[in-house]
Image (spheres, coloured by chain):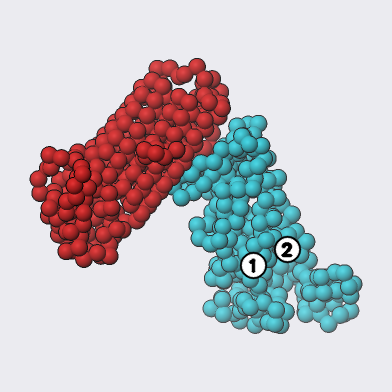
Chain colours: A red, B cyan
Amino acid sequence: MSTLILRLEAAPDFDVDLSGITPDALKDKRLPDIRRLKLRQGQRDMALGDLFAIDGTVGGDELEIHGACTRLHHVGAGMRAGQLRVIGDCGAWLGSEMRGGTLSVRGNAGDGVGASMRGGLIDISGSVGDYLGAPFPGAVSGMKGGTILVQRRAGRRVGDRMRRGLVVIGGDAGHGCGSQMIAGSIVVLGAVDSGVGTGMRRGTIALAQAPAGLGPGFALNGHFDLAFTQLLLRHVGGLKSAWRSRLSGIASVERWVGDAGGLGEILILS
Amino acid sequence: MKINGTFIEDTFAEAFPMKATRLIITAYNATWANHAANALTGFATSVIACGCEAGIERQLKPSETPDGRPGVAVLLFAMSNKELTKQLQNRVGQCVLTSPTSACYSGIAEGDPLPLGKTLRFFGDGYQIAKKLGPTRYWRVPVMDGEFLCEDTTRVTKAVGGGNFLILATNQAQALAASERAITAMRKVPGVIMPFPGGVVRSGSKVGSKYKTLPASTNHRYCPTLRGVVDSALSDQVGAVLEIVIDGLTAPAIDEATRVGIRAACTLGSKRGILAISAGNYGGNLGPFHFKLRQILK
């Protein structure tokens, strides 16, 4: 596989929009054309080559960004295919409106990761900010497909208004996890803050640790040994080997249902 | 050609193209997975009157199933996608959905999709839940013991139906003993089922009948009680004939099942009454798949 590599020459002291810098978008371009690609920086444009040293092979399905920093926003936004690997931290809207391919980050990411995402896989080794998998500004619903894996902590409102897809948080999740969920699945292997599932209509939130409390719209539905739970846990365990051992031995779930419409479910894995 | 003194006739089995799918049925334990699988594959011996041919392919360990519970792999064969769809809907709906603790998954990854949970979900009356994990969609249908979990679709593949061989023995007991040995060996071959009761059929048929309404009737040339009455294919020593019919996902799978089945049947040999092995065909004019016994046994 041929890989195109972008190396950040120096961390910028301004915010940069990397929309459009994806493996599928660069695949058919020549190196000089790639260097001349315009990036939005405030009210001005700048060339990709002004910010990054670009080497590697063009024409492939793989792109790497080395030395990324939190000033880089919209990394992998709108990506449709291929593999994008980011070494370093990223800013907001990573993988927003993504439709396919794999976006992996060795580092942390800011707010709005996977906003209004429709497909593909986002895999982040560190922590993320607020509104993971939530609606992109102007959109009615959050992510509509795909998978987001966060190995450490996620901020507030994970999966807000999420409609489809799977989010797995290896660490803790902040306030309002799964708020206003329309459907889809969220799995949190760490602790969750208050407001879990507030306003959710449907969808599943599976928690490895019981929350301090649930909203008044939720009622205990019972303890169940569901085939779906095992299917979900095996699927999640298959995504990260480190999670497999944490999920093994879980037999039954405490199921709570409720909130807006009464069909949202919170599974407490025990 | 002889094996242990059993004569292998220089003939072939004639088989036909079919459409097939594999389902994986899981349950709380193997007993209940088998209850569901046995019900699903019941009354599915021949497409002549059952709509499909179905059988248990093998037992599955928990590590081999999607939900980590004990399971059973079953194969269903029909003459068309339309008929297979209908049979799936009826059989899974009435035999698996109804069976305590069961879940049903596709056991084939490639091929055109056929609806499975996609249609059965409506039993949930609006309370059903769709879940997509990776590329696969599932349905969770609320039922009285919890949930029926079912994959949205299964896949259909081209397959081969009607592979067969005949065991010609001195009497019924010997024919049955050889058949049982054959079936035990053949059940270890992946990708095949023997759809008749116990894997064995005694009423081998020919195409057509003197009665116009019947599409098939008894294979009179292989009925020992008609020897001397009709142009019999049996020698004077043959007192019973049993047939093993094989449906397979591929022709090589049927080759392998035929090979191990005949070899197992022949372990009894001519001294214990297994006189000959033959096969059923229609002169080679109807089915495109020909399984030549001697070639397979080389």
State whether residue A262 is above or below residue A83.
Answer: above
Q: Residue extending furthest left?
A: A10
Chain letter belonging to callout 2: B
Tag 1, which secondary structure? strand
Looking at the rendered image, the quarter that the N terminus of chain B falls into is bottom right
Q: Residue at x 85, y 69 (%)?
A: B214
Q: Nearer the viewer, residue A66 or B218?
A: A66
Q: Is residue B152 in view from this perspective?
A: yes
Q: Residue at x 38, y 20 (%)?
A: A194
x, y (%) of residue B298?
A: 53, 78
CA gap between label 1 and label 2 equals 10 Å
Q: Which disc, if any, is residue B47? A: 2
x, y (%) of residue B40?
A: 68, 49
Amino acid under label 1?
Met
User: Is there one chain holding both mark 1 and mark 2?
Assistant: yes
Amino acid under label 2?
Val
Q: Nearer the viewer, residue B33 or A163?
A: A163
Label 1–label 2 contact, CB within 8 A: yes
Q: Residue at x 58, y 61 (%)?
A: B156
Chain letter belonging to callout 1: B
State whether residue A122 is above or below residue B83.
Answer: above
